[in-house]
Image (tube, rainbow, N blue to C red):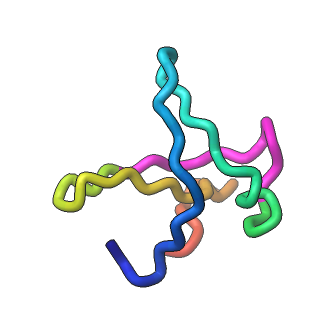
Amino acid sequence: MKESNIYLDTYVLQQDMRIRLPKSILSNLQIEKGKTKFDVFLDSENKSLVLKIHSKDGGIIGE
């Protein structure tokens, strides 16, 4: 795991494949419920999922 990763909480994968996100992301990121889109990446080497906020211009924020 990268040193820049911050542990927030542990959640169960729901039957319909949803994962609840911790409320703390609302205060730490500029996102809105029901509006913000995320790009989902698989890091197979580390068996990790990575969520990145999708930018409106089609690029990925932070890259």
Q: How many marks?
A: 0
Residue ranking furthest to the left: 45
Residue 19 image-quadrant placement: top right
Image coords of residue 43 (percent x, y): 27, 57
Please name whichever residue, 45 or 37, is drawn nearer the observer in this view of the structure: 45
From this view, report whether residue 3 is shown above or below residue 47.
below
Please name whichever residue, 61 or 3, is drawn nearer the observer in this view of the structure: 3
Give the main secondary structure of the magenta stretch: loop
The part of the chain drawn in magenta is: 31-41
Image coords of residue 47 (percent x, y): 24, 52
Identified at 51% across, 23% down, the residue is 14
Image coords of residue 27 (percent x, y): 82, 64
Residue 34 is covered by the magenta coloring? yes
Identified at 48% across, 16% down, the residue is 15
| Residue 45 located left or right of residue 7 | left
From this view, report whether residue 55 is shown above or below residue 16.
below
Image coords of residue 13 (percent x, y): 47, 30
| Residue 6 located left or right of residue 45 | right
Please name whichever residue, 8 or 2, is drawn nearer the observer in this view of the structure: 8
From this view, report whether residue 39 is shown above or below residue 4.
above
